[in-house]
Amino acid sequence: MNMKDVERKWQSRWEKAKFNNFDEKSNKPKKYILEMFSYPSGAKLHIGHWYNYGPTDSYARFKRMQGYNVFQPMGFDAFGLPAENYAIKTGVHPKDSTERNIATMEGQLRAMGAMFDWSSEIKTCEEDYYKWTQWMFLQLYKRGLAYRKEAPVNWCPSCSTVLANEQVVNGACERCGSVVVRKNLTQWFFKITEYAEELLTGLENLDWPEKTKLMQKNWIGKSTGCEIEFDCDTGDKIRVFTTRCDTVFGVSYVVLAPEHPLALKLATPEQLPAVEAYIAETSKVNEIDRLSTTREKTGVFTGAYCTNPVNGKKVPIYLADYVLYSYGTGAVMAVPAHDERDFAFATKYGLPIVKVIENTHGETVLPFTEDGIMVGSLNFDGLYGEEARSEVANHIAKIGKGGKKVNYRLRDWLVSRQRYWGAPIPVVYCPVCGTVPVPEKELPVRLPYDVEFHPDGKSPLAKHEKFMHTTCPQCGCEATREADTLDTFVCSSWYYLRYADPKNDREPFDREKVDKLLPVDTYVGGAEHACMHLLYARFFTKALRDMGYLDFDEPFLRLVHQGVILGPDGNRMSKSHGNIVSPDDYVETYGADAFRLYLMFGFSYTEGGPWNDDGIKAIARFMERVEKIVLKVTDYPSGGGMLGAEEKKLNYARHFAISRVSRDMEAFSFNTAVARLMELVNAVYKYDGLAEKNYTLLKNTVKDLVLLMAPCAPHFCEELWEQMDGKGSVFEQPYPKEDPNALVLDETEYAVQVNSKIVCKAMVANGSSNDEIRDLALSLPEVQEKTAGKELKKCVVVPGRLVNLIFG
RNA sequence: GCCGCUGUGGCGAAACCGGCAGACGCGCGGGACUUAGAAUCCCGUGGUAGCAAUAUCGUGCAAGUUCAAGUCUUGUCAGCGGCACCA
């Protein structure tokens, strides 16, 4: 078969018949199958795209044949940093390079032969999309879910520009090598923490990989504890959060994160220079290093003191970078006797270590961090663990110094980016009215084309006079626009909704359409999105629900992660490793179907692994074998009356394949699905080799083979189906259904074990009782030989599997 | 460092709920066809010992639970993903 011609032929037929477009009028049950959209940073599809989209398209086709009205859209996540970096390097405008990349990728995606509904394509960088991204921002703002506060960015002092974490290599700027510092800017946030609890509990009912749910759970990081207020001598109050308030009598100092607003305020004049130096020093250390438990603890005394509310003791206030301003209250009470980090810090700085918890079983070795009995804690002495914490927290609440508190590790989502290639934040700053949202009817706030990218201390939009200069929507006086753009994760937090109504120019989507098509039934994409994109999208769905724009709680009912295809050397494919394998040559040589089929067969879908093309020829051979037998059998006459043992065997193989391929396709276990197809082909060849055969059975079996295989090799099977005189498209055929009767055998082979070691095999008639199976096993000569004179102690029968005889 | 995952033949992998480890395929060995090669077809193929029947070892490593462990538990080593401005 000339696959090139066959691919073109069927692709153009599908196109003409609008075969891949979602049929809104159909009354079949819908199935929204979605792959994460493409990011057009490179010009061409890479193996990762193929690996994500090829097999998932086979799943979508499988569902279609099973009678579902399948919606499988595709689009481009087109804003983002790489296009802008590319522009800085080459001078090619991000819009131009992105559009060019999209055009190439689109062509390649079409050539893949996937069932994408191109009529609902989305590109997030286009006005008619980002207009609604801005609209989303305004809705969140209206509802109090968008706000501004100071937050640090990575700042390269020599390029005078903000750097992404990715651009910071070992604490230095990737371009010029200067040491990167953290600098505070006022930036926009989305209040995702408001939904922390629901984002956590909502995980429960989702059909997602357990590991992904666990990662999100840990990311949200709920912890139940107590907030405690320490009064400073200056009159300021330091609030700390702790999960171990039962240790509060052992506090020997309080630590503020270096970024804490009180840090400079509390510092005494003598200590101020040291404090300032320390703050400057820690601004160069990233959070990952700061949290490292092996890194040596550093800190500085502020010179100030505060009072422990439970015992009136004065304790010194320190700054230390192992405390993060972004978590909890940005301050902790330090109990060196019962916390590893505090212990290390106190030891280094010679601070007191006071034991207030005793081990109930054995000696108390400090630091002792497990639950224990309170000691040296006045009238709380003798209380244990959870009860102790509850009593102490109640006491703290009673004296008005805090109380029980639930804390989340999850932080609000910083959406400001000091960059050009993104959706402008639709806000105006007016000297009179302050922060004013752009009225909805004035959207979109257009991203100007003529900008200067070269980094020189100001973000590109801030330098664009015409863009920045505007009038206040409220009072009409001169005002400036927000120069920052939105994080691209904002664009990708709602695209799955826009697909349902992509051309709507009055609203982001029609509610009825969205409620009908959504939620997404199956979402397929990389596991690297577990904590961010997938959490942000869930947040958007919930916020939009609460604002009355849609009627479901979760965007993605089922989630599947494809694995990562690594380079042949086992490293992630990258230019710097020089190990990039392009799909193009393979597609050119073997065809799109063979390449897809190989991706399905050669890897465990959710695992991925190093690239290796050893098996791709085998796939081509397999397809040839299928083609040969299909053409041969098609020419056979019908009829043939015999229905003997061989026919039963063939029919068993046929229905076994139907049963297992269906099950494996549903489970995204594509490699085993293809293996079962191969077994069926082997069985057909074997039967075809017999002198006498039942032609009708053989023809029907081959017909089922083509139907089973169609989702995995769509062009190839369309062509075979046509040559078999099948009517219409093979994808309009129902997927074969197994006949349970064909799968019933008279007897099953059991493994016979003596003392858990396999001795022999035995055929057991189906329907035998456990006692019958035991007696049969005992009567076997191999068993008797091993057990002569011994007494049977126990017998385990595993139905359909084995019998284990335990002798004394 | 923290969170999560993975580790099975020469290779890609499979193994439903704890039940015959290695399905399917690659590679390799042998054979058929052929003047020859390619292609195709058939047989074999975890390691070790043995002519063989067979024995014995075997799922990163070390323990444990169980009639039975690749699968569960604890510890440990290695690799991968994420760690909030790559997306």
Image: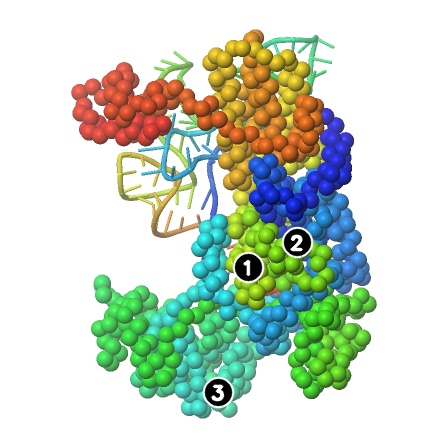
Give how far across and how far down residue B77 sits, in percent: 44, 50
Numbered disc 3: secondary structure: helix
Give how far across and how far down residue A683 sits, in percent: 54, 20
Residue under pointer 3? A266
Residue beneath the point at 57% across and 22% down: A701
Quarter of the figure with residue A111: top right
Residue under pointer 1? A551
Quarter of the figure with residue A226: bottom left
Give how far across and how far down residue A381 sits, in percent: 23, 76
Residue beneath the point at 76% across and 48% down: A104
Callout 2: few (<14), some (14-19), or many (20+) C-alpha neighbours within 10 Å? many
Residue under pointer 2? A499
Q: Are marks 3 and 2 in contact (CB under 8 Å)?
A: no
Q: Nearer the viewer, residue A333 or A117?
A: A117
Quarter of the figure with residue A238: bottom left
Residue beneath the point at 67% across and 76% down: A437
Q: Chain of mark 1?
A: A
Q: Is residue A654 visible?
A: yes
Callout 3: few (<14), some (14-19), or many (20+) C-alpha neighbours within 10 Å? many
| Disc 3 residue type (three-letter) | Leu
Q: Are marks 3 and 2 on the same chain?
A: yes
